[in-house]
Structure formats: structure tokens, C-alpha cells
Image (cartoon, rainbow, N blue to C red):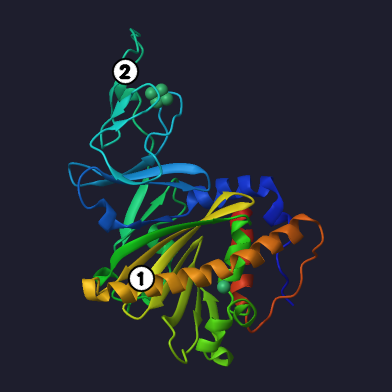
Amino acid sequence: MEKNLSAKYYTTPEYFESERKTMFTHSWQLLGPVSLLTDSGEYISEDIAGMKVLAIRGRDGCLRAFRNVCRHRGAVLVPKGQGRCHAIRCPYHNWLYDDAGLLKNAPWFGEDPNFHLADWPLEPISIEVWQGLVFVCIDPAESLSSQLAGVICELDDVPILDYQCVHTEKLVFDANWKIYTDNFVEGYHIPGIHPEFYDAIHFDQFETQAQDGYVKMTAPGKKDLFYKGRWYWMWANWTLSLFEGGMNTSRINPIDHQHTELIYHFYFDDVSDSAKGAIDEIIQQNLAVVRQDFQICLDIHQNYASDGYQPGPLSPKHEQGVGYFQRQYANALNGS
Ligand code: FES
Ligand SMILES: [Fe+2]
């Protein structure tokens, strides 16, 4: 019988530190649609488990990514979010980097024969684009395609490149990121937590498969279901859910061991004015389902943190995804 992970992994700050050093430094992290980086100078700045990164389109057309950390005394260079700039000026002492990360000026620094601008470029990190989605990795343990593994073929039939990103939504809640992940990779809680969603699917035909870097959940819809009945979670912390004519992606990003942010992007193929009402409705319905999960995650976090919980059994029918994620997690934490 497979059992749930021990509570200490969710509630101890030291495990968050280990996760940062093992999983989050070495795995590819979804930043968002490449359409946000179309023109030169456009950037996306995000946190990865507290590590600040930025991706920017250079004037030479190249996409690059860096730690969003000034080489002088460590200030944050550009604010979190999306924007456009032609040079990266540190707000602290005005050091100026170009869009290729080279230090071009350190005003008022003074004379030091051992100080050379060329010695202090921004620290580069890896960046790749797959199906119009931008991923970065601080120190890759494997290629992006190797990490994506089976999901590449799995999503072959989805015209992702035809979709346009129309909306970004960030949601923050007070629970460990793995409690939310455990929750995402099982449909077992749908009757209890999402009654309207339960009414809209054939729950008795809900299926979960976990293999090759991803968890896939499917269920035939009954009526008025805005989902297409296919949901995915991918190692290490991103998700993709299909709608009629669109999809969303999310990254489950730990802020620390007890706070998590979700960064959602919503994509649709028909983004004409006439489709706007339907798009807004799908986005709001979808976010309502996401928010329904928060309270249970908060309560579970408190139970885990209170020493009041010993690991219980996982359902062989509905919780293979939970077991799969937790095994992958344990392997990553152990460096295997
Ligand atoms: S920390 Fe950036 S210029 Fe001083
Ligand atoms: Fe849920």
C-alpha cells in the first residue's frame, strides 16, 4: 500500500532550501508565452522558488535569460512582471547592462585599475522555447525535451501554436506548494470540493495515468463543461488544461515553505471581439475552480504543521498521480 509523504517535507524550511538547491535550480521552469517577448527589449521577470530571473529579447533578435541580480551588491534589476527596456539599469547605484547582459557603465565608481566592466556581466541562465512556451533553467540537469519527455507526444494533437495568450493571473495562498500539487494530480477530491464540476463530468469514468514526466487525467463531460476533459501536470511544477478552442498553463511556484503562488496564462484560438464574452466566462469559471482548492490546502497545511498527521494510504484508483509526483520528488531531493 502506497502512503502519502510525511508532513515534515511540507512544513520544514530546511526542505524548502533543499528543494531550491536540487529541483528548482536544475529543472526547466515555465515562464510564459514567447509572444510576450516578440519585440526587442521585451522582458519577463519572475521568481523561481525565491530566485529572481529575467528573460529578454535582445536587439539582435536573440532570447537570453539572466539572474535578475545586479553584480555590484545584489539589487533586483527589473521589477517582477512584463515590460520593455533597452538597457537594464540597476536602480541602486545605476550600473547599466545591455540587453545581452554586458556591463556597459558603472557611473561614479572611481578609479580602480583592477576593475573592468567586461569582468562583470549578468549571470546567464539557460532559455528554450517549446511550442511557443518559454522555459528557463538556472543550471540544467537535462535538456528541456528530456524533461518534457512523454508530454511532447501526448500534446501532439493540440494546436498550441495557434493559440494566443489573452490573460495572465497570479494567485497566492498560504500552503506548501506540494500540498497544492498533490491536490492537482488527483480527481478524487472533485465530488467533495467542486460540486458543480462533479455534476458536469462522468466521475465514474475519471482516469488518471502517471508516467514519463507527467500525470494525465481525463473524464468525459456531461453538460456545459468548459474544460475539454483533459488535464496535465508536468514535472517539476507546471500544468496544462485544455478547453474547447484553448488551454491554460500554470506554474506552481513556492514563495517559501508555507506560501505558494500560481502563475496562470490563458490561451485561445479565436480571440476576436465576438469571442471575448465567452473567453471571459471560461477564465472566470476556471479561476473559480482553482480558488475552490485553496481552503482545503490551507487546512491541510495547518494539520501537517501541527504534528497532528501521520501519512495515510493513497487510493490505487485515484491517487497514482500523487504517488508518482511524490516518488519523483523524493528522487530529486535525494539527487537520484
Ligand atoms: S547593486 Fe546594482 S548598482 Fe549597486
Ligand atoms: Fe481541485
Question: Taking 15 as reference, is 262 left or right?
Answer: left
Q: Quadrant of the C terminus?
A: bottom right
- Ligand 1, by image quadrant, is top left
For residue 207, above or below residue 301:
below
Which marked residue is nearer to the observer: mark 2 or mark 1?
1
Q: Position of residue 16 (x, y in %)?
A: 62, 48
3D distance between C-alphas at marks 2 and 1: 52 Å
> Closer to the N terminus: mark 2 or mark 1?
2
The residue that label 2 is drawn on is 116
Q: Amino acid at mark 1?
A: Asp
Of the pair 3 and 227, the residue shown nearer to us: 227
Q: Position of residue 278 (x, y in %)?
A: 33, 77
Q: Position of residue 219 (x, y in %)?
A: 50, 86
Helix, strand or loop at mark 1 = helix
Q: Quadrant of the N terminus?
A: bottom right
**Residue 128 visible to the viewer:** yes
Numbered tag placed on residue 151 in the rendering: none
Q: Quadrant of residue 296?
A: bottom right
Q: Amino acid at mark 2?
A: His
For residue 109, above or below residue 86:
above
The residue that label 1 is drawn on is 280
